[in-house]
Amino acid sequence: MSHSKSSTRWLARNNADPYVREARAQGLPSRAAFKLEEIHQRDRLLRKGMTVVDLGAAPGGWSQVAAGVVGESGRVFALDLLPLPKQDELAKLGVEFIQGDFREAVIAEQLLAALAGRRVDLLLSDMSPNLCGIPSVDQPRAMHLAELADEFAMRVLNPGASMLVKVFQGSGFDAFHKQLQSHFGTVTIRKPKSSRPESREVYLLARNFKSLSFV
């Protein structure tokens, strides 16, 4: 199949996607917002006054949902390599955005500086590598991002805090799941209805962070 035919097929499927249509109707940046909304409705993940960090935030749907719940008394810090299309609108909701590659230590330190010693109640990570379609390449890259998110969580989370992180089922998944169980009270797998059925992506919801010595 030629690239043009493949692209046309993807666009047709995307335009027919009910979550894509609903996101456009609601003025949301993407269908991904519904994934967080669904998990929040099921698990009461967000609440007013929370401090939230959103890794892999672009195009901004998760940050928009989070800011809408935590309200003016809460804070949302967003980070992504890509710009946020609605950055000005999100800023009005109280979202503080840092653009950069989280794999670079200097960017992670920039986020820490923005937090200014504030402990985090919820870490969200929807980070995903640029997928090439080769599992032996894509899977290690995706798991590396999940590992980085967990390392950051251990530096910033409040005791009892939560983390929601995207992972892909495959090599390294079970080991990472066990890793989270070592420093969270519970770890559950979530596959939102708005996640494409054919995708290997799932979300690990880790709750009740066991306080480690703060770094």
Image (cartoon, helix red, strand yellow):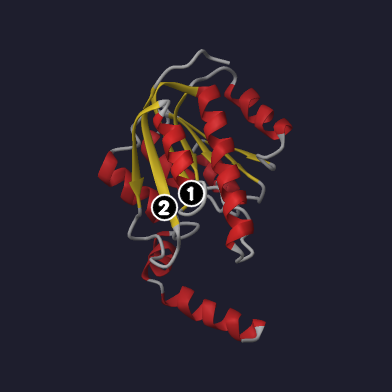
Q: Secondary structure at mark 1?
A: strand
Question: Mark 2 Cα within 10 Å, few/some/many (few <14, many 20+)?
Answer: some
Residue at coordinates 48% horizontally, 44% vertically from top-left? 63
The residue positioned farthest toward the top in the image shown: 213
Relative side of 177 to 109, left or right: left
Mark linked to residue 202: 2
Disc 1 to disc 2, how far (Cα)?
Answer: 6 Å
Q: Position of residue 159 (x, y in %)?
A: 40, 19
Q: Is mark 1 in CB contact (under 8 Å) with mark 2? A: yes
Picture layout, residue 78 above or below residue 61: above
Front-lying residue, 101 or 15: 101
Q: Is residue 72 visible?
A: yes
> Which residue: 41% across, 72% down?
17
Amino acid type shown at disc 1: Val
Residue type at tag 2: Val
Above or below residue 1? Residue 177 is above
Residue at the location (39% across, 53% down)?
Answer: 35
- Left or right: 164 with respect to 126? left
User: How far from the left and from the top, in percent, is residue 33?
Assistant: 42, 53
| 202 left or right of 147 in image | left
Q: Image quadrant for the N terminus? A: bottom right
Q: Position of residue 97 (x, y in %)?
A: 60, 39
Q: Quadrant of residue 116?
A: top right
Q: Nearer the viewer, residue 64 or 42?
A: 42
Residue 96 can be seen, yes or no: no
Q: What numbered label is drawn on residue 184?
A: none
Residue neighbourhood size for the residue with mark 1, other residues' Cα within 10 Å, grouped as few (<14), some (14–19), many (≥20): many
Q: Quadrant of the C terminus?
A: top right
Numbered label tally? 2
